[in-house]
Each structure stands twice: as structure tokens, then as C-alpha cells.
Amino acid sequence: MKNFIKLTKLSLIIIFLTSCKTSVTNEELIKNSEDIKSDQITKVKSKMELKYSCGEDGISEFLNDGWIIVEEYSEEKVCTWKSISATKDCDMEKDKGCKITIPDKIGEEKVYLLEK
């Protein structure tokens, strides 16, 4: 019975890992001319997602390379954490159980969806 449970867990993990695919959008453009017969040109669009957190920004490098911002949104994110003692008598060096970790600085994470 234990072997059956292990085999089931292993097969679920394998299914989840192999189910991921990359998506590429193909567009077919048709070039019409009176003298030249119609040719099909396949254009592959490249897409990228960039995330910048807590005041970082490097999007201008990609914009200079010809990338276009398709979508932009931001989310709130914790930038740094700090540890405080749970009680006044707590010694954080000796007793690790009385240490509480709380957010120190909260910033913004910007997410850019780019297309070339």
C-alpha cells in the first residue's frame, strides 16, 4: 500500500512537471502584388515578462532594443524584513522561539509584459 501511494505521488509530480509548455504566437502575413505571386511570410512574435521590485528599473534597455510594452501593472510587495522580540524579556540570541519577523519596508513591484 505504501508503494502504491509513493507511485501515485511520483506520477502526479511527473505529470505536473511535463505539462508546462512555452507558447509562441505565429502570424501569417500575405503579401499581394500584381507582378509577384502571393507569398506567405511567417512572423514570430517574442514575448517577455519583466518584474522590477522596490525602486529598481531597467526597462529602458529593452525599450531601446525595440521591445514594446503591451501591458503594465503593479503590485504591493515587502522589500525588507526585520526581526523583533516577542516580549520585553526575550533574548533573541539565546531563544530563537521568541523572535518575530515583520515587514520593514513595503514597496511596489512593477510587472511589464513586452513584445517584439
Image (tube, grey):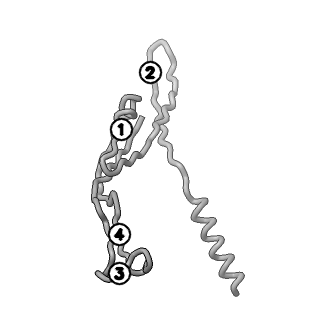
Mark 3 or 4: in front is: 3
**Secondary structure at numbered mark 4:** strand
Q: CA distance from mark 1 to mark 4?
A: 33 Å
Q: Nearer the viewer, mark 2 or mark 1?
A: 1
Name which quarter of the figure residue 60 lies in. top left
The residue to which callout 1 is attached is 59
| Residue at (44% x, 21% y) in the render | 32
Q: Position of residue 68 (x, y in %)?
A: 35, 35
Q: Quadrant of residue 34?
A: top left
Q: Amino acid at mark 2?
A: Asn
Cα–Cα gap, marks 4 and 2 = 67 Å
Q: Residue at x 59, y 61 (%)?
A: 17
Q: Mark 2: give few (<14), some (14-19) or many (20+) Cα within 10 Å.
A: few
Pick the residue in front: 97 or 50.
97
How many discs mark residues in the rendered view?
Answer: 4
For residue 90, which numbered disc appears in the image?
3
How many angstroms separate mark 3 from mark 4 (CA)?
A: 12 Å
Question: Which residue: 32% across, 52% down?
Answer: 109
Discs 1, 4 touching: Cβ within 8 Å? no
Position of the N terminus, as image quadrant, is: bottom right
Task: Identify residue for label 2.
Answer: 32
Looking at marks 4 and 2 on the same chain, the residue that comes earlier in the sequence is marked by 2
Q: Which residue is mark 4?
A: 83
**Mark closer to the chain start, 2 or 1:** 2
* Residue under the point 28% across and 53% down: 108
Name which residue type carries label 1: Ile
Q: Position of residue 113 (x, y in %)?
A: 37, 44
Please tell me whether residue 38 is drawn above or below residue 10 in the rendered image. Answer: above
Of residues 70 and 54, the one drawn nearer to the viewer in this rendering: 54
Quadrant of residue 106 in the image?
A: bottom left
**How far separated are the C-alphas under marks 2 and 1?**
37 Å
Graded by Cα atoms within 10 Å as few (under 14), some (14 to 19) or many (20 or more), the crowding at tag 3 reads: some
